[in-house]
Image: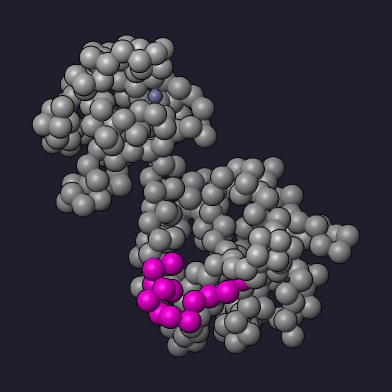
Amino acid sequence: MRDEDIRSSCFNSLAVLCAQFGDDVPYKDGLDRGFAFRGTRVPFLTYQKGIYRAAAQRGPAALSINTSYVSPYEDEQTDAGFLYAYRAGSIDQPDNRALRAACELQVPLVYFIGTRPGWYRPVFPSYVIADDPAARRVTVGVGVMAGPLDDQEAVIAEDPIERRYAVRQTRTRLHQARFRGRVLPAYGSQCAICRLKEARLLDASHILGDLDERGDAVVSNGLSLCSIHHRAFDQDLVGVSPDYEVRVAPRLLEDEDGPMLELLKGFNGQPIVVPKRRSWQPDRNRLAARFDRFVAAS
Ligand SMILES: [Zn+2]
């Protein structure tokens, strides 16, 4: 038996939460509100355990699964999707039955992946695309919502190449979200250059990008920057010297075009904010390599 109605109510309510909070949603005062379904409130997940089937459901398949921030998801994936382990105990205990039924019935569910303490990235629609009882785990693939805006339907691509693409994209975004979740708090959630403290306007930028062998997602390879400074840093319009000083590109300094630009120019020669903890401070060697590029570009 399928239970499409409760799944669409769940996805619609999640879309509203994502519109409110962004790609990541807090558990407290967010997901813990649950969603409305036929006059009752239904929880999205139970964070005490990973696999969740709502009492209001008629079908046997799980409605959501979750992985907390502390469990390392990085090693638990293949090209086809995310590997998700059964619960301890019999492979036929209720949670495992619900997980495996999602594979048999090919129904869409939500995969809540922890991106920072107390926050989840709801990946939906997700599908349990393979079940491996011997290894006691399933593979979770990533689908899309398709069709007209007011009547969207969850689907997963037939084509394995498209499926792999969706997984890779999700994984990249998750990496970025987790990097942001570590870098921003290290800087007291402010822009290292202008000290802006509006979290929704802050990004974690890489000093050296993914393509560089030193471009890993450690806090010392990051800078917390507001959207404008992030963009300017990426475009080599603003640089940060290895001694933590802001440099504005000469071509920007020579420009005269209104108060916003004057504001940007005003940070030239100013020190950046750095985290108190030494291991979190921007790595001077990485900054030097990046600063060479800035100098060459300007
Ligand atoms: Zn800024």
Q: In which quarter of the image is residue 145?
A: bottom right
Image location (x, y in percent) of residue 159: 43, 80
Q: Which residue is drawn at 57% across and 57% down?
A: 122
Q: Up-down: is 277 above or below 261?
A: below
Q: Which residue is drawn at 21% across and 52% down?
A: 211
Q: Is 164 contained in the magenta span?
A: yes
Asked if residue 285 can be seen in this view, the reply is no
Asked if residue 161 can be seen in this view, the reply is yes
Q: Which residue is drawn at 73% across and 59% down?
A: 43
Image location (x, y in percent) of residue 82: 44, 70
Compare residues 50 and 247 and report the one nearer the observer: 247
Q: Up-down: is 38 above or below 260?
A: below
The reply, left or right, for residue 92 in relation to residue 56 is: left
> Which quadrant does ligand 1 occupy?
top left
Q: Give the range drawn in magenta.
A: 154-166
Compare residues 110 and 187 and report the one nearer the observer: 110
Q: Which residue is drawn at 49% across and 46% down?
A: 116
The reply, left or right, for residue 135 in relation to residue 273 is: right
Image location (x, y in percent) of residue 175: 38, 53
Q: In which quarter of the image is the N terminus?
A: bottom right
Q: Quadrant of the C terminus?
A: top left
The reply, left or right, for residue 14 in relation to residue 258 is: right
Image location (x, y in percent) of residue 31: 67, 51
For the image shown, how many numbered marks are present on the structure?
0
